[in-house]
Image (spheres, coloured by chain):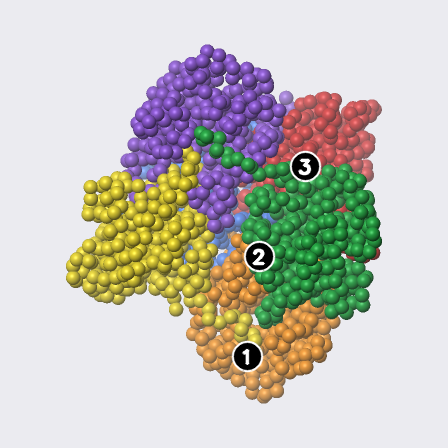
Chain colours: A orange, B green, C yellow, D blue, E purple, F red
Amino acid sequence: MARPVTLFTGQWADLPLEELAARAARWGFDGLELACWGDHFDVQRALQEPDYVQGRWAILHQHGLQCFAISNHLVGQAVCDPIDRRHQGVLPAHVWGNGDPEGVHARAAQEMMNTARAAAKFGVPQVNGFTGSAIWHLLYSFPPNDFTTIAQGYQEFAGRWNPIIDVYDQEGVKFGLEVHPTEIAYDYVTTRLALDAIGRRPGFGINFDPSHFAHQSLDAVPFVEEFADRIYHVHVKDSKKFLNGRNSILGSHLNFGDARRGWDFVSPGHGDVDFEALFRALNRIGYQGPLSIEWEDSGMDRDWGAPDALAFVRRTDFSPSAIAFDAAFQKR
Amino acid sequence: MARPVTLFTGQWADLPLEELAARAARWGFDGLELACWGDHFDVQRALQEPDYVQGRWAILHQHGLQCFAISNHLVGQAVCDPIDRRHQGVLPAHVWGNGDPEGVHARAAQEMMNTARAAAKFGVPQVNGFTGSAIWHLLYSFPPNDFTTIAQGYQEFAGRWNPIIDVYDQEGVKFGLEVHPTEIAYDYVTTRLALDAIGRRPGFGINFDPSHFAHQSLDAVPFVEEFADRIYHVHVKDSKKFLNGRNSILGSHLNFGDARRGWDFVSPGHGDVDFEALFRALNRIGYQGPLSIEWEDSGMDRDWGAPDALAFVRRTDFSPSAIAFDAAFQKR
Amino acid sequence: MARPVTLFTGQWADLPLEELAARAARWGFDGLELACWGDHFDVQRALQEPDYVQGRWAILHQHGLQCFAISNHLVGQAVCDPIDRRHQGVLPAHVWGNGDPEGVHARAAQEMMNTARAAAKFGVPQVNGFTGSAIWHLLYSFPPNDFTTIAQGYQEFAGRWNPIIDVYDQEGVKFGLEVHPTEIAYDYVTTRLALDAIGRRPGFGINFDPSHFAHQSLDAVPFVEEFADRIYHVHVKDSKKFLNGRNSILGSHLNFGDARRGWDFVSPGHGDVDFEALFRALNRIGYQGPLSIEWEDSGMDRDWGAPDALAFVRRTDFSPSAIAFDAAFQKR
Amino acid sequence: MARPVTLFTGQWADLPLEELAARAARWGFDGLELACWGDHFDVQRALQEPDYVQGRWAILHQHGLQCFAISNHLVGQAVCDPIDRRHQGVLPAHVWGNGDPEGVHARAAQEMMNTARAAAKFGVPQVNGFTGSAIWHLLYSFPPNDFTTIAQGYQEFAGRWNPIIDVYDQEGVKFGLEVHPTEIAYDYVTTRLALDAIGRRPGFGINFDPSHFAHQSLDAVPFVEEFADRIYHVHVKDSKKFLNGRNSILGSHLNFGDARRGWDFVSPGHGDVDFEALFRALNRIGYQGPLSIEWEDSGMDRDWGAPDALAFVRRTDFSPSAIAFDAAFQKR
Amino acid sequence: MARPVTLFTGQWADLPLEELAARAARWGFDGLELACWGDHFDVQRALQEPDYVQGRWAILHQHGLQCFAISNHLVGQAVCDPIDRRHQGVLPAHVWGNGDPEGVHARAAQEMMNTARAAAKFGVPQVNGFTGSAIWHLLYSFPPNDFTTIAQGYQEFAGRWNPIIDVYDQEGVKFGLEVHPTEIAYDYVTTRLALDAIGRRPGFGINFDPSHFAHQSLDAVPFVEEFADRIYHVHVKDSKKFLNGRNSILGSHLNFGDARRGWDFVSPGHGDVDFEALFRALNRIGYQGPLSIEWEDSGMDRDWGAPDALAFVRRTDFSPSAIAFDAAFQKR
Amino acid sequence: MARPVTLFTGQWADLPLEELAARAARWGFDGLELACWGDHFDVQRALQEPDYVQGRWAILHQHGLQCFAISNHLVGQAVCDPIDRRHQGVLPAHVWGNGDPEGVHARAAQEMMNTARAAAKFGVPQVNGFTGSAIWHLLYSFPPNDFTTIAQGYQEFAGRWNPIIDVYDQEGVKFGLEVHPTEIAYDYVTTRLALDAIGRRPGFGINFDPSHFAHQSLDAVPFVEEFADRIYHVHVKDSKKFLNGRNSILGSHLNFGDARRGWDFVSPGHGDVDFEALFRALNRIGYQGPLSIEWEDSGMDRDWGAPDALAFVRRTDFSPSAIAFDAAFQKR
């Protein structure tokens, strides 16, 4: 039996949940991964309003949709990041507050704990998100890094996130970091370091999204094999390199959607990710969770793209075999 | 006639100039590009001590060496960069001062002006270096950039560097930015923007170094063709990608020399740069200046590498043709 | 909204228009691009018979088909070409006449003017076609070309086509050269030269067909970007290289369909053209015209191929996005 | 008209023919290629029981299925192989007997003759299978081969198979060796040698299966062209290389389905075989027989895979053209 | 023992033989292949002046140089080509005459016969050259070729060259066509056709030059294997593709040396030809003749390039083995 | 300081040691790795004759040559292999005896113990060789392997080699298996299994030869990193793939040197091995032992090849760096 396919609602936050749910159901999705922004899933209301979570379920059930995870990337980012005006643009007002960095860090951490509590109340065992990073901006070591600073970045991450994950453990919810540039972990090396820093505690795992690997020239398959016991959730998103000798793989400080970039996000199946290889690897490690389409393509109409992506996943995510093909040759 | 080949002294700053000059001459170099750190070329002493520049020339002449340029990357970096502890590690004490960012910016700008004055006194028409950048750290647009901030970065660069270049113009010296990640310009798109921001004034040009292009998947040839009138100086340095599906092209926050990086600098001729294609392009645009070997390879002994690099350039930098090969077929 | 998809009738000229229209409609095409040979669109009858063009529309409308362009490649070819027996095989008798080259040139030019008049009468604003070339056969410079001869070829082209385009301007019709080997323009360099020769007048533009670019190792995307204001019509045709070390990219003077050739035309989606990249580029330049399938594949039954090609275009030519995917992250 | 598509039953031998026939018909196959193991086609019963072959046809006809070939790979393998315990696992008891090698060879040869007789009685003109090889295990020449031993391997093959093929000639049945590692012929060179050894007699031809070529880096197209007059039957099976610098193309003595192998069999269309190129080549040589899907993929559920494979073949095996595409340009 | 390395003098025809011989000897060449233009080898003088050929040898011997072949490409070209003004530019006046095409054909044929006579008198058994072609300009079949015209081109070639080769046979000299675009044979297919047309007579063979193959994507190795018995002489020349999506492999009607071409000739070892593979193949077919460097590189000074090319050949053309490497393992 | 470069004498066993030593010294080698066949190093004489080992040293010292290892591949092969006539061709008579397999196994094991004793007496701490394998011939699992048989192969290897290695431990000598097809270990997977089977005892390590990896598409670098503590000795040998769609990577049962093979051994630097990457990896793991050229190239004269290989290693095996290149930027 194939895995359920959900739609991550983050890129549709301009639409009310009711409308998006209706569309997703019409396209044939099995469920939604709710973003904790827009009106899709409000952590504060979930904790404070007695009927909020039932109301969310009511909308979902009305359209026959399931929910396996909620996501709170934007707040998680503020836990470790050096804070600047960009965070103000994406944080809820009560998290931003007056914008003093340590206060933002603390309020963001608190909100991530509350996200666990809200997820538990909602009855969903998985929260996906970002962690931010105190050291990401030191990516290129010039002026030369003092690499003890880099090491401290991992320690700071552990110091800020261990208390958060304590709450997740209490609530029976798991956190899945979307391994991603700008986060504490964004590739093999940094994922190992981040997991080590936090003691490889089970409450902290991975929301694996291969679109962040392809443009780094990273192969997704050995990653899910190496971190098999921490793959808690999977995003289906794609990216594509456009390298012609004039476009930089670093992106030239251009916005997504600019054709002069060396890579960009594209609708699943239109890019460089080898999804069949990935799904076969997920079969081998026994991943049974949802495949959640996070749809981002600056050059495609999203209402054309979402069902196209769903169809792509349906025809690519086949069931694994329960029998060796050459077993039939042999006598029993 | 082939171009002169010089050795950039920046990576040998632990050696006194006398010793390095002796080695370079023995290896067969035509000259040195003097770094403004270590004891190789001291801007303050050049301006203040009557005999300093003659003393430098004496050392060079003793070994039959020429000099076409001096370089001051580390101070230039501090002109636009957000200042942090890394800058303290590489700046002269009188530039760092008490480390207050605006003071550092101002003192660095002043030192870059003085570098022009010292070059003029030394009798060398070219200063190479870095500019720093107020926006480099916003490389990956998450949290999403406000792209007016990016645009302001270029304006800030112009605001800080125009007064510096005024001095270069007065002194009859040209500045060559080494187009490089962490600088205001690091690829095609950003070089166009930076040159536009500063009004394409002739005093501000390029020290072209192809090693910073190869790992971005950028082709050096159309770059020197597009910016032919701003190629004032050329570094011969190489880099190599080590992409096996597990190493990230972003470098994993690992130091140079770590085999888990997706790319690294290597001795010229040992990497991905197509130097023959580059030298042919330099022939086509009429570049007559030096080829200056900036030697960086974490896995090779530098005393093995420098003469190896020189031999590589000598056998690759052939003279262009003065005759069409099929002219001989035809009657005069 | 996706672009209309039409079928170019040139390769079906053995069928009467009625029959082809019925098939095309059954397959689901939006319209036809009528060839000015076979019985599909007869320039002389269009000008001379009062009801001819209405009769053509009647057939089209009966099957719900649109028409955005007519094409007259074969006559256009004779305007500039050195004339030989091959032209007799493809020209109408009244254009070939007695076959004297200058007479053929003049009559072909007259017929191309009449094609504009017929298009105007038919109510279609676009004529596609070829120009021929006085210099194409000098492709490989041995014996060594006198390159003033090459330059004269462009002047001769301008001299012959400017009077023709005068008529197009008068009639409010545009001409689209299908950039193609054997024509005055067949790649980037020659398109620039041809457009310059004719003064970049708006009446003379391009019918872009990527199948002629792939086997030259040319990338279609920067072409439509560079010549965005001259892309008046687009053909969807594909070609594929079959290079195994024994097949020549030059084709060995073998007919299309011979497996020993180094390249051949194939049904769209079966070859080397990256149509998704092309369609994204057409979105960026704002091309709203038809995608006209010119179906040529010597190894496939055309009645199998035409609907296969249509389905390919339908699933590849998606609508562009009207919203940035990360806009939803941000507060309004 | 496209070719019929059949399903080879060998990998479904755990299912009774009735059940498999029902499934295959439901999926839309045109017929079955019956394996001579499991209960699908029993050579002994076919020869001994008066109604057996009618009974098989009755099952097939009940589901509207055709049959063009039967296959007896496992017994054929024992004709030339050095005999070991692996053969006992796959041979019928009456062929294995007491397991003495010469006896096994003789009984296997007798059974292959009987297979021809059974095919003739069944009314099917084609038997596919293996030959085994006395020399396959000497693949890597260390300790250094005496190459006269290799030459003798071909002679031994001819000596054992000529009497078998005599029976095929008498019965009007043809044998098709599936060219395959472990057989006397597995690539271009060895197929030439094997056909030469047996005098290129028409009774001995090829069941071509491209999946055995892809992992050897062999191109299927020139093979079917070179051996066009011996391509008697075609298997549609696929294989894929998984080469990452750590997986060996030799397979590491790992079982199929292990992700550490350098190659593996995969469902048709999911691997390295270029089926479109192959089908075009089959068109050129005039092959009109069935395309028989031999389904093997250790990572895919076979009931998902078989209809997926069928759909793949239906959309890839187009009819060839009966008309030159540029014929329509020219006057008749 | 390695093969002798000679320098073809055609690209140095502006220098008197005395000067070129002195340079070639100083660089270390073993000999010269004399061009029949400039003053290097004058066919008419060789036949008419009693001491001319001794005088040529005297110059060669003075510098210790050998001679294995003379070459007359420019006149040979005029035997079959449609004659135009380009031929006037490269033909001797007595061959061009009044330029009437049939007269030029006849006089060129006569001169090629005289070239054989002169070679015989000179004591050199090999003449290299071109044939021209009546059909080369029909390379791209549009307007569609009547392929009987193509077939006639081969017959015309045979008709014109058979009488010429009769003289070669009488004189004991062999002709080597340099297989090359613009000639009757330029790849595998056309070489087969040309050799067939002329009856595969031994007097007509090949001067193999791999530089004309690389840009056609042709592999030189199977060519020398297929035509092993006709490889009479070998040129060492190189070419390189410059394909970046904007440069056409067809060359854009640009002169050699223009960086916008998709390919160009380059000094040996600087291009796409795999000379080691070629030399190994020449070893296998037993070719013992000279390797003659035909030096053409529009971007390199020829006096830098010629010795660079010679050094390249010396280090690449190793002697073949006379012993199997694993023979030493085995007991005698 | 670079590593010593030795020549493995196995492929020169037809020459007496005196003659080979003289040649190797003349070419500039630092030493020899003596083969235990031919007359280079005779195990029996070393143990039985009092002056034998001094005699060997005398020859070496006379030519200034060192010795770091002796090798006994041919006898080691017979320890685990199924014995056939090929072994008789390469074994000493006293090991082959009457050829009964178990007797050969026992005598070969005894001889490998004696080789350790002889090495110790000779004063050389390293013996290289092969192990043979009971299961290699089951490489392709058809008829389907019973994989318990494969597992038993590793156990049998351990059972036969543990007593041998006991002697090595006693003698203070290490054994280095040349990981190689036909041996118990030939890639990553099988090396892990073999080392595990023998308990990862230090007496049993690896003689690493990258030529056996390249044709398996295996990357040598991660191998030496993974097995860093078992890399006891390194062979410099190269292999090259010749894949053109017609040559099989499995070699077609053709002898080395046949151009129809899909791969072959070639002189170092002429093949697919990336020696610079390998030598950098050896630097990282701290390997200080010899680089021993095992010269095998069926297409090159060995007396041309050996000094060519030596020069290749000398220019590629540079010393590692003792200083970080950006250390000079920073203040002390």
SS at mark 3?
Answer: strand
Q: Which of marks 2 and 1 is in front?
A: 2
Relative vertical location of residue C296 with respect to residue A35 in this rendering, above or below: above
SS at mark 2?
Answer: helix
For disc 1, the neighbor class at 10 Å (few under 14, some 14 to 19, many from 20) is few
Q: Position of residue B106 (x, y in %)?
A: 74, 66
Distance, label 1 to label 3, CA atoms, is 65 Å
Q: Which residue is drawn at 46% across and 23% down?
A: E36
Badge 1 is on which residue?
Answer: C332
Q: Which residue is drawn at 56% across and 37% down?
A: B321
Instruction: Name the foreground residue: D209 vs B127.
Output: B127
Q: In the picture provided, is B305 more to the left or to the right than D330?
A: right
Relative vertical location of residue A186 with respect to residue B326 in this rendering, above or below: below
Looking at the rendered structure, the kind of residue marked 1 is Arg
> Residue C236, located in which quarter of the rendered image?
bottom left
Badge 2 is on which residue?
Answer: B188
Relative vertical location of residue F79 with respect to residue C196 in this rendering, above or below: above
Distance, label 2 to label 1, CA atoms, is 33 Å
Q: Mark 1 lies on which chain?
A: C
Q: Which chain carries label 2?
A: B
Badge 3 is on which residue?
Answer: F236
